[in-house]
Image (cartoon, rainbow, N blue to C red):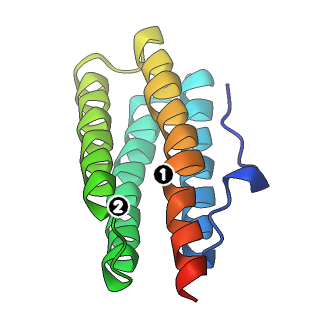
Amino acid sequence: MAVQWSDELAVGVGAIDEQHKGIFSRINNLLNAMAQGKGRDEVGKVITFLADYVVKHFKAEEEIMAKHNYDGISSQKTEHAQFIRDFSALKMDFEKNGVTTHLVLQVQNKLCNWLKNHIGSEDKKIGAFLKKCA
């Protein structure tokens, strides 16, 4: 079950939108690797890369919010931290148990749904705020 990027998710900030598209692409790579029964090393590489990429993305997003004095930055940071905790738990599950049906479902439910909801709601607020500032 792939997660699809759509223009409805666009925030309107080029750098953020490109990073969001990259996250969607990499989650799809992860789901594909798991679905194809790729080896533990391959799935592990995708998980490790995605973990690093998401942290860098959140940092860049938070820097933009801080630069423009976005009043929702605190709740954004809280949500980002929760996502990182959830992702870390999935990574530990993978390291302990490998690719399981439970892991695949958790990636789909926790990561895919969170991203769609977070980007479609919270991140769109950033875009609207920045448009007002322009």
Q: Counting residues from the N terminus, which is met first, the one under dot 2 or under dot 1? A: 2
Counting every numbered tag in the picture gives 2
Callout 1 crowding tier (Cα within 10 Å): few <14, some 14–19, many ≥20: some
Residue at 54%, 34% in the rendered image: 112
The quarter of the picture where the N terminus appears is top right
Callout 2 crowding tier (Cα within 10 Å): few <14, some 14–19, many ≥20: some
| Disc number placed over residue 78 in the picture, else none | none
Q: Is residue 74 above or below residue 24?
A: below
- Direction right: furthest residue: 7
Q: Is residue 9 above or below residue 42?
A: below
Residue at 25%, 49% in the rendered image: 78
The quarter of the picture where the C terminus appears is bottom right
Residue at 56%, 22% in the rendered image: 37
- Residue 16 location (% of width, % of height): 54, 69
Find the distance from the CA under tag 2 to the CA under tag 1: 9 Å
Under mark 1, the amino acid is Glu
Depth order, front residue of 35/54: 54
Q: Are marks 2 and 1 in contact (CB under 8 Å)?
A: yes
Residue at 38%, 83% in the rendered image: 68
| Disc number placed over residue 122 in the picture, else none | 1
Tell me the SS state at disc 1: helix
Which quadrant of the figure has residue 86?
A: top left
Under mark 2, the amino acid is Gly
Left or right: where 119 falls relative to 61 = right
- Residue 17 location (% of width, % of height): 61, 66
- Residue 92 location (% of width, % of height): 22, 29
Which quadrant of the figure has residue 33?
A: top right
Q: Which residue is mark 2?
A: 72
